[in-house]
Amino acid sequence: MTFDNWLPLLILLTSLLPGIVIFVLPEERVRWRTTLNMGGAILKLGLIGIMIWGVRHEHVYDFRMPILPNIELVLNADAMSVMMTALSGVLWFLTTLYAIAYLETSPQSRSRFFGFFSLCVSSTVGIALAGNLITFIMFYEMLTLTTYPLVVFRGTPESMRAGRIYIAYTFGGGAAFLIGVAWLKALVGSVAFTEGGMLAPYVGAYATQLRFIFFLMISGLGVKAALVPLHGWLPKAMVAPAPVSALLHAVAVVKAGAFGIVRVVYDVYGIEFSGELGLLQPLTAAAAFTIIYGSVRALFQDELKKRLAFSTVSQVSYIALGVGILGPIATIGGIVHLVNQGLMKITLFFCAGNFAETLGVHHISHMNGIGRRMPWTMAAFTLGSLGMIGVPPMAGFISKWYLGTGGLTAGKPWVIAILVASSLLNAAYFLPIIYRAWFREPAGSWSARPSIGALETHWMLLFPPLITALLALLAGLLADAPFSPLEWARLITAREYRP
């Protein structure tokens, strides 16, 4: 095989192999653990850069390994998988940097944490690069198994309970998804991802069965994507350390479910065939309800991470909404939100972790004047919040503009009402935090500044949210630039709607 054939596997191994080695490292081997973490992350970014250039120029990257008769593990790269892989690579690098400082004084095993952390990212990359449903579900379930130890990492009764809830939801969803995949495999044979879908020839003979299979698969994926009423695990999982919360919400578990929905609709069923079978209306209704429900629940949370968790329930469903509207413009809005939401939400969770780690602040009611003590962190939080509301020129505005325009173009003006209501609710639960942090007087004096020089917190905690906030701003300001998330979403959409 050529280098192009091996490249997807090499990208996967840059986090998988360091993760395995880290497990056996003694706790005191801090330098070795850091070198493996950061070295793997940097190498992954370099290989992803090669793949981005290649896919843009129609190179074919395809790794295949037989597992069982007529079943192969397939890793390949198309425009969709490259977008998700690039997001995973960039955010893994920044989250690893953040986690090294965050867990510097942790009494729990850091080798265990970073081992599972690397395996979690490997699972996410495997999902992104999966070339068929069999490969997808293997890494999808591996993601469940590798994130559970991260959710329960602290070992407290609260975290162990959250872990049990997480496992119950995700194993149930995984079982439904597996049944759907096995049923589809038995029905049509091939379960390879194909741009434009591959089930149209079977509509006459298997229409009813294909509807049931779609319901099973979307239900299974909807657990990780936190579609209501399958979202109950997500707010509970916020007991995990901030780096885990950031990864869960921005690129790993939640985004894996949303990415899977995109794959099933576009590359298994095909967008036009899904519309003919009447599959998109229920998906759109579920997404619209989840958008409003998550925002309403966020309003009543005083714990910062729980408010952000319910915000994720709402915001991730923008992706499913874009998928279900049926039209290229809305598709662009849904797909670009895969990246935009990730950049904005990881910024917010990084900042929440900084407030907790530096000042011991976990609740919004305790954030009066916090912007004066941690101005750079709060500036990043402000940008992320404004992006979630959809204020131009932030990345969130781009997503909402294309979703709204796509809804009007598709003859569904009610989409505008959902987006307006959601944005008003976003403002209602983010703007009071911003006002409280910048303009209210602190209730008391903040704790003494740690011995960290001129910075407000450790530089490895401060640098990642500043970078992700800047990326979220640039994704809006430079939306039409080559290789921007929007330009890549347009490329994906053009290929999915190719005659």
Image (tube, rainbow, N blue to C red):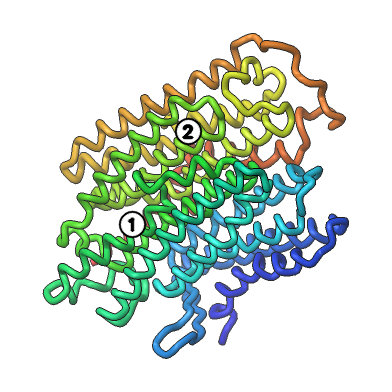
In the rendering, at what x and y percent does residue 480 appear? Answer: 43, 45
Question: Can you say whether 491 is above or below 386 in the image?
Answer: below
Q: Position of residue 97 (x, y in %)?
A: 72, 48
- Residue 208 position, x and y percent, is 16, 68
In this rendering, which labeled residue sits more in front, label 2 or label 1? 1
* Residue 387 tag number: 2
Query: Residue 217: which quarter of the image?
Result: bottom left
Q: CA distance from mark 2 to mark 1?
A: 29 Å
Q: Is residue 120 above or below residue 2?
A: above
As helix, strand or loop, the secondary structure at mark 1 comes to helix
Does the rendering let one see residue 49? no
Q: Residue at x 74, y 57 (%)?
A: 38
Foreground of the two, 85 or 244: 244
Outermost bottom residue:
69
Q: Quadrant of residue 181?
A: bottom left
Quadrant of the image containing the C terminus: bottom left
Which residue corresponds to the image point at 45% horizontal and 33% vertical from the top-left?
388
Which type of secondary structure does the marked residue at label 2 adopt?
helix
- Residue 50 position, x and y percent, is 58, 67
Q: Nearer the viewer, residue 496 or 440?
A: 440
